[in-house]
Structures are given as structure tokens and as C-alpha cells.
Image (tube, grey):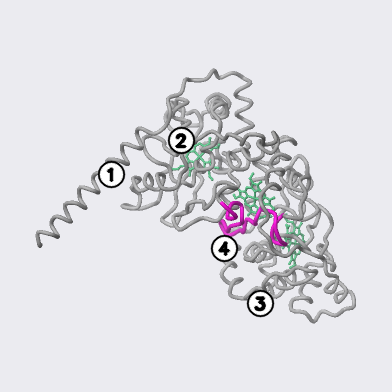
Amino acid sequence: MSRRALYLACAAGIGFVALFAATRWSDTHTGAALAEPALTGERIARGAYLAKMGDCAACHSVPGKPPFSGGLRMETPIGALFTSNITPDRRYGIGNYTLADFDRALRYGVAAGHTLYPAMPYSAYSITRPEDVAALYAYFKQGVAAAAVPNRDSEIIFPLSMRWPLTVWRWLYAPTPRPFAAPPGMDRQLARGAYLVQGLGHCGDCHTARGVSLQVRALGPADGPAYLGGASVDGWHAPSLRNGGAATIGAWSEADIAQFLTGGANRHGSAFGSMSDVIVNSTAHLTDDDARAAARFLKSLPDTGGRAYRYDPAASLALRRGDADARGARLYLDNCAACHRPDGKGYERVFPPLAGNPVVATATAESLIRIVLAGAQTPRTAAAPAQFAMPAFAWRLSNQEVADVVTFIRTSWGNDASPVEVRAVGRLRETAGRNTPP
Ligand code: HEC
Ligand code: HEC
Ligand code: HEC
């Protein structure tokens, strides 16, 4: 080895050791010193509400196991990991946590001296206010039953399972935790909505696109039009929540959005896929004021432009004349029109309209293909206790037929989205089969 190469190798070695030491130091010195709060009944009740708002159950509770005892399998590109037990169990849960430990996990993404995988949405939670962190802490200490369920090790293999690169990720991408402060003069309800949607609600974890390092590209409106601009997540497409053309909720009023969040459906569409779970576990429990505040904030986002939707009766008139020559029209009449009607307008809050529905107009058709293959059921909430089902067509329609009928709904009644290729259906058929509801 030449002398120069030796120097370089030494320098790289020293650099690596220094980096490693710096990550260790950061993981053991991050966070703020905080005094223990009184665990009053009022604070615990407030924490229970905030836990709904933050949808902690979505990831930390698994059906058939004690609430918040963890164990949900989450796939990542490098292997599966499992969520933690966050019940007050002293051995396996967070029974020995202080408020400072809890705050460190929730807002800084650091627990037990290591950085957490960003599957835990600490980038969003980082703006949670101190009184809300204390209320959540009180709830998880006293309002949740301790469950002695051991944590499961991740299936990520060595050396990828080393956690120090996560510390580097955190330095690069996680914002410095800072309690949300509304800009001076901001309307109280709008400020409440901004706090809820960007913070505990972590809506951007699904609705904002991610970068190559899986970081959420934009954490708030100041970060530009990527914020809530729509993204694909776990085989569903979470559409744009901004104002803009036909593929956004620009045509929805504040009341429409609030109704969707609390009841799972409105005159424009109904919830399915991962949004159904968000509604059942989280947003259906919001007070009317908070649901309205979230809607208000979404309506305040700058317009991203695009052609607005206008109903076009041509497809409906053709179907009524018995003219089913358009690609997929016959399939639509035979399989879909009984519920979604030949005019594509459905029956309000029973069978969603397909005409002018933003989920039909999104650039990617993955949600549409998947819902046709696997079917769906509207979420059951206190505001909408009756459930309506969409049948699965995986066994009845070929890949070509699914592509044709989805193309029909994407190009009829004024919908102006791209046609669907048969290949895309083939790719989704296998995963949709696995996720078919019972
Ligand atoms: C989208 C999924 C998701 C949501 C929502 C979520 N978590 Fe987590 N959480 C995780 C995952 C995954 C881990 C483990 C990460 C790891 O092992 O690096 C975790 C870890 C934690 C830990 C660290 C526990 C430990 O000692 O290892 C705490 C505390 C925690 N979460 C609390 C909460 C609270 C409180 C909420 C609701 C406000 C919440 N989480 C919401 C996914 C989630
Ligand atoms: C776990 C991922 C996930 C999270 C978190 C999430 N969403 Fe969604 N959301 C989706 C998916 C997937 C859809 C598409 C299915 C549908 O329309 O129901 C969707 C659809 C929606 C729609 C309907 C859009 C349309 O064009 O039909 C609204 C409104 C919405 N979400 C609001 C929110 C708000 C507000 C939050 C935060 C409180 C949130 N979402 C959090 C995944 C998520
Ligand atoms: C028995 C009645 C029924 C039939 C037949 C039916 N659907 Fe549905 N469809 C529903 C219901 C109910 C929902 C709402 C599901 C949910 O919210 O989870 C739905 C949802 C949808 C959605 C998502 C829209 C939204 O906002 O939720 C699309 C797209 C869709 N159907 C397309 C089709 C197509 C294409 C066909 C024919 C191949 C079809 N449906 C046949 C009842 C039906």
C-alpha cells in the first residue's frame, strides 16, 4: 500500500470512529429536561383524546392483542420491523419512562439511547406542544392497562440493522422539535387546524411524497406544493389534499371535508383503504370543532392549479341509448352501473359517485385497480353506523377487463384521466388478493 493510500485509510477510519462516537453522543444527549406532571383525571382524559388524534393505535395496537401492546409488522425496503409495546408495563412497555423519556421518543425520535426508525412519525409529532405531550404521557401511564407483551426484534439483518445510520438520518431530515406557534394574527380555528394536520394528525406521512431516503418531502405549507400534494403508500394512493384541479379536493367545501373525516363519506366520495382505518381509529373521534379546523387549514393551502372538473353527460346519454361501444362501457353497465348508476353519480353517501371524484382522477390508478379487484367496505363510525360494500371483482374480471372498466370510469362523465394498461392490473392482482377483506 502506498503511503498516500495508508493516510487516506487512516483518515477514513478516524472519520468513521468520530462519526460513530458523535451518533452515540447524540442518541444519549438528545431531548429536554422536564418536570414530572401531575397525573390528574382531566389530563389523562385529554391525553386519551390526543392519542386518538395522533392515531397511536393504528401502529401500536394489533387486533386480538391488548391495546397498545405493539407488534404490528411494518415493511421497509431493508426488512420488516415491529412496533413497540407502549403500555405502562415496566418490563416490556414504557412503565419506567419519565416525561422526558416520553418526549424524547415522541418528538425527537430517540428511545433507550438509540434513534427510532422514521416509521414512527416523529418528524410530524415534533411540533406537539408541551402540555399535550404531558397529557399523552399521563394517558399512557395511567389510562392504558399494562400488558406484559415482549417486543419483537426487527427482521432487518446485520449490518443494515445497526442503528447509528438512523441518527445520521435524523440529523439530516428530522426537524428540530419546536412547539407549534401560530403566526401572529392567524385566526384561532385555522391555527388549531394547522397544528392538528401538521402535528399529531401526521396527515403528511401518507399524503406527502417521500424522497430517496424515505424522508417526507415537505412538512408544512412553507415547504412548497409537495406538502399534501398526494403520494402512494402501501399500495394505495393518498390523493392531494390541496386546492387545485379535478384530482384534488379543491371542489370540496370545509363542511364536506369535515363530514368525510368524521363520517367517512360525503357527496364527493367515500373512504377506503388505509384512510378507512385513519377515520375509524382517529378522525371520527375528533370534536366537530377540530374536524372543522382541520378542514379550514386544508382549504387555506395555496392552489396548485389544474383543470377544474365539469360534468359531461355524453357517456351517460350513450349508455341510456344502449350504445356501449366505448372501451369498458359494456363492462361498466353489467358490473358497476347498478350501484354507481349509468350517469356516474351514485347515491349520496351510500354508493359514491365516480363522476368528479378526485380518487378517480388521480394520475396513478393503483387505488382504483385495487378496489375493483379486492372490493371495499365503507368505514363504520358513530356518525355513519350503516356500512355499504363494494364487491370484489378479482374472480369475475380478467386483467384486460379490469383495465378496460377502470379506463371507462377515468374517461367518462367529464373525468379526464389517463387510460390504464393491462400490465398495471397484473402487478396489483397478487397483492390485492392478499389484502381481500373477509
Ligand atoms: C405510523 C406508525 C406509528 C404511529 C402512528 C405511532 N407510532 Fe410510535 N412507533 C412506531 C414504530 C415503528 C416504533 C418503533 C421504532 C423502532 O423500533 O425504531 C415506535 C416507537 C414508539 C415509542 C418508543 C418505544 C420504545 O421504547 O421503543 C414510543 C414511546 C411511541 N412509539 C409512542 C407513540 C405514540 C404516543 C403515538 C401516538 C401519538 C405513536 N407512537 C404513533 C410507529 C408508530
Ligand atoms: C395511513 C395513511 C393515511 C393517513 C395517515 C392519512 N390519510 Fe387521508 N387518505 C389516505 C388514502 C390511501 C386515501 C385514499 C382513499 C380514500 O379516498 O379514502 C386518503 C384519502 C383522504 C381524503 C379524501 C380525498 C379524496 O380525494 O377523496 C381526505 C379528505 C383525507 N384523506 C384527509 C386526511 C387527513 C386530514 C389526514 C390527517 C388527519 C389524513 N388524511 C391522514 C391515507 C392516509
Ligand atoms: C353493490 C354495489 C357496488 C357495485 C356493483 C360496484 N361498486 Fe364500486 N363502490 C361501492 C361502494 C359501497 C363503495 C364505497 C367503498 C368504500 O368506501 O370503502 C364503492 C367504491 C368505489 C370506488 C372508490 C370511490 C370512492 O370514493 O370510494 C370506485 C373507483 C369504484 N367503486 C368503482 C367500481 C367499479 C369500476 C365497479 C364495477 C366493476 C363497481 N365499483 C361496482 C359499491 C359498488
Q: Amino acid at mark 2?
A: Ala
Tell me the crowding category of disc 1: few under 14, some 14 to 19, or many 20 or more residues within 10 angstroms, Cα based: some
Ligand 2 lies under 8 Å from the Cβ of mark 4: no
Q: Which residue is mark 3?
A: 400
Q: Secondary structure at mark 1?
A: helix
Tell me the crowding category of disc 2: few under 14, some 14 to 19, or many 20 or more residues within 10 angstroms, Cα based: many
Task: Give how far apart the Cα atoms at labels 1 and 4 are.
Answer: 39 Å
Reply yes or no: does residue 296 show up in magenta: no
Task: Give how far apart the Cα atoms at labels 4 and 2 are.
Answer: 33 Å
Cβ–Cβ under 8 Å for marks 3 and 1: no
Closer to the camera, 103 or 75? 103
Ligand 1 lies under 8 Å from the Cβ of mark 1: no
Say which of marks 2 and 1 sits in front.
Answer: 1
Task: Give how far apart the Cα atoms at labels 3 and 4 are.
Answer: 17 Å
Q: Residue at x 47, y 42 (%)?
A: 175
Q: Which residue is mark 1?
A: 20
When asked about the image quadrant of residue 68, the answer is top right
Residue 323 percent across, percent down from the top left: 85, 80
Closer to the camera, 411 or 5? 5
Q: Amino acid at mark 1?
A: Phe
Q: Earlier in the sequence, mark 2 or mark 1?
A: 1
Mark on residue 82? none
Q: Secondary structure at mark 4?
A: helix
Task: Give how far apart the Cα atoms at labels 2 and 1 are.
Answer: 21 Å
Q: Which residue is mark 4?
A: 431
Q: How many marks?
A: 4
